[in-house]
Image (cartoon, grey):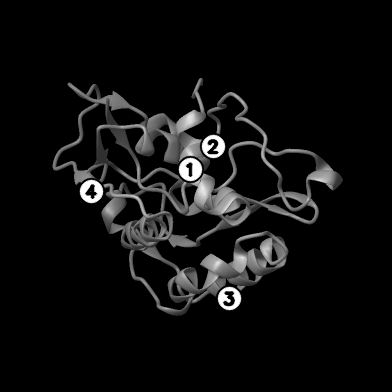
Amino acid sequence: MNSLIYPTYFPNIAHFWAMVNADAVHFEVSDNYQKQSYRNRTEIYGANGKMALTVPVSYSQNNRQLYKNVKIANEESWQIQHLKSLQSAYRMSPFFEFYIDDLIPLFENQFEYILDFNLKSFEVLLSALQLHIEPMYTSTFEKEPIGKTDFRNLAKRTVKVSSFEPYTQVFTEKHGFISNLSILDLLFNEGPNTELYLKRQKLKT
């Protein structure tokens, strides 16, 4: 399977499933940016349930922009807020201390473009998970790609995927299991078992 997928902000479990179970991964980087997607948003499990973390971007719906040209609105202190949210949500998880030091530089160094930030985040995640995925990058946009399984719709927040196998989350006793959160939720809770978990799952949309 050759997966065609968008690089997103700390991809959710469905995104990572589509990459870990692929023979080759192709990142779509030649499209126009679309709002209301996971390109600049991830979801974690906080004390009050599902919590969205959104990277602010400078983008106008009236002027079409390529995804790779959309800038982060760094005048907002979003990095501090996101790091604090992760610390609050996961500091009691089994593997938080094991991985957080690898992630902190992402919240200390400014990036100009959201695509560059997402690609760097993906690189850090691969290192943490000890995964060997070398994505290829599209040079043109194909509405109906040939020879690739199209997972680009997973970037839409409106797309629902089937619930994944439950694992223990920090606030499970409070709110129950919440499926398909950011890969960070799985990483902090399952640690080295993350890859095995992903390979066991089946994805249905």
Asked which quadrant contains residue 163, the reply is top right
Question: Up-down: is 112 above or below 118?
Answer: below
Residue that mark 4 sits on: 134
Q: Residues within 10 Å of mark 3 (few under 14, many from 20)?
A: few
Q: Which mark sits nearer the N-terminus, 3 or 1?
A: 1
Q: Amino acid at mark 4?
A: Glu
Q: Quadrant of residue 86?
A: bottom right
Residue at the limit of the structure toward the left, as seen here? 139
C-alpha separation, residue under disc 1 versus residue under disc 4: 24 Å
Mark 2 and mark 1: span between their CA atoms?
5 Å
Q: Residue 37 got which mark?
A: 1
SS at badge 3 = helix
Q: Secondary structure at mark 1?
A: loop
Residue 116 left/right relative to 171: left
**Location of mark 3 (residue):** 80
| Residue lying at 45% horizontally and 33% vertically, measured from the top left | 199
What is the three-letter code of the residue carrying label 3?
Answer: Ile
Please state which amino acid type lies under the numbered disc 1: Ser
